[in-house]
Amino acid sequence: MGAYIFISVLILIVCVLLVLIVLVQNSKGGGLASNFAGSNQYMGVRKTADFLEKATWTLAIALLAFSLVSIFMIPKSNNLQNVIDTELREQIDNTNTQPVEDYKAPPPQEE
C-alpha cells in the first residue's frame, strides 16, 4: 500500500511539472516563454527551447513509466471481498430465518 501511495505522489508531481513546462514553452501565440526571453542572459533562446523540449519529453516518459508501474502496485485486498461475502451471507440467512407466522396468505378467491 505504501509503494502505491508513493507512486501516486510521484505521478502527481510529474503532472504538475509537465503542465508548468508546457505553459512556459513558446507557442505560436507567444506563450509565457516570450516574457523570459529578454531576461535570459547566459542561455540563448534556442538553448532554452531545447531544454524545455527535452524536459517535456522526459516528464512525459516518466509519467508513462510511473503509470505503468502503478498498475502493478495497486493493493489487492481479499479482505474487502471477504467482508462483502460475509455481509451477503448474513443478509441471506436473515431473510431465510424469518418466522412463518409473519407470512399471511392471500384470501381465497371465489369463482
Image (cartoon, grey):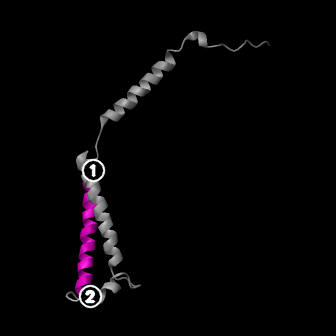
Residue 93, image x and y in percent?
46, 19
Q: Residue furthest front?
A: 39
Q: Residue furthest right?
A: 111
Q: In the image, is residue 33 part of the stretch drawn in magenta?
A: no
Task: First in sequence, mark 1 or 2: give its number.
Answer: 1
Tell me which segment is drawn in magenta.
Answer: 46-71
Residue 48, image quadrant: bottom left
Residue 12, image quadrant: bottom left
Going by the numbered disc 2, the residue's amino acid type is: Val
> What secondary structure is found at the residue carrying circle 1?
helix
Question: Is residue 30 placed above or below 73 in the rendered structure?
Answer: below
**Nearer to me, 51 or 109:** 51
In the picture, measured across the screen, residue 108 lies left or right of residue 20, that is: right
Q: Which residue is mark 2?
A: 45
The quadrant of the image that shows the C terminus is top right
In the picture, measured across the screen, residue 15 lies left or right of residue 41, that is: right
Going by the numbered disc 1, the residue's amino acid type is: Ile
Residue 72 can be seen in this image: no
Q: In the image, is residue 65 part of the stretch drawn in magenta?
A: yes
Residue 87 can be seen in this image: yes
Q: Which residue is mark 1?
A: 5
Q: Residue at x 24, y 47 (%)?
A: 2
